[in-house]
Amino acid sequence: MSERRLKTRRTTKASNGVPRYAYIANELIDQIAAGKYPVGSLLPKEIDLSEQYGVSRHTMREALRRLCDSGMVSRRRRAGTEVVAAARPISYRQPVNSIDDLLQYGEGTQVRVLRKTRIACDQRLAQMLNCPVGRKWLRVETVRTYPGDSRPICVTTNYLNLELPQIEMGIDNLTGRISAMLESRYGVRIVSIEQSMQAVRLDKREARLLMAKIGSPGLRALRRYFDESARLLEFSDALHPGERFTYVTRLKRDE
């Protein structure tokens, strides 16, 4: 095996828990942006890329799918993978086809904690979290941006289960997704996610936080993250600016 392949194989494994397909997709995006593959050119064939990165064709196919979802390439059967843009579109695209995709949400973006505080549930929040009135949770407010762009693609209010010991410390040391921190820090596994979405119009405060126009469209996503014992670990209320966010889902018919 060549030195190039050995180096690439090691790198795709050692990327802070990022799956190989996601790492490869990000590397190809960087190469396109750097001009290695100009707009109008074709990427190497799937089988050649698989050989280059030392991964299965299934892994490479998933990497190319994510590249398509970024809006930078277009794949056509028998025609190959054509580069159609030298940079990601301004609108952030979130491809979600599985729990793993949802847990990888925000990959390649930056998250900043605005504030955290312990709160006691009022009746409305207790109903949302399916817990008794007065139960305490840790509320964490975050903002997510794309590198090189100060405009937020998401502001999120998270409620974290205080049964998790020293959870504030986990937030203080947060470097990525909260769900990933919960799994690695506490050895839990998120096995189910309930998600609902609603189209909204941004009020004055929301528009200010998202650097958007008052009354412009937004997308609110509510998610509940459960472990194997059906315990609610995290509830998130994420608000996205409609003009800078696209939610992508692929549905397949059962065999």
Image (cartoon, rainbow, N blue to C red):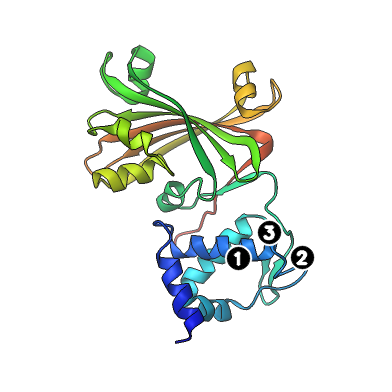
Q: Earlier in the sequence, mark 3 or mark 1?
A: 1
Please report contact status of discs 2 and 3: CB closer than 8 Å, yes or no: no
The residues tagged by marks 2 and 3 sit, at their Cα atoms, a distance apart of 9 Å
**x and y, in percent, of residue 169 in the image:** 31, 34
State which quarter of the image contains the N terminus: bottom left
Vertical relation: 24 (above or below) 167: below
Say whether residue 255 is visible.
no
The residues tagged by marks 2 and 1 sit, at their Cα atoms, a distance apart of 13 Å
Seen from the viewer's position, the closer of residues 47 and 88 is 88
Quadrant hosting residue 229? top left
Q: Earlier in the sequence, mark 2 or mark 3?
A: 2
Select label 3 or label 1 by which is in front: 1
The residues tagged by marks 3 and 1 sit, at their Cα atoms, a distance apart of 10 Å
Q: Is residue 220 left or right of residue 104?
A: right
Which of the numbered marks, if any, corresponds to residue 72?
A: 3
Q: Is residue 191 left or right of residue 106?
A: left
- What residue lies at 49% left-to-right and 58% top-to-bottom? 253
**x and y, in percent, of residue 172 in the image:** 37, 34
Three-letter amino acid code of the residue under disc 2: Val
Three-letter amino acid code of the residue under disc 1: Leu
Vertical relation: 59 (above or below) 246: below
Which of the numbered marks, if any, corresponds to residue 39?
A: 2
Vertical relation: 233 (above or below) 202: below
Which of the numbered marks, if any, corresponds to residue 28?
A: 1
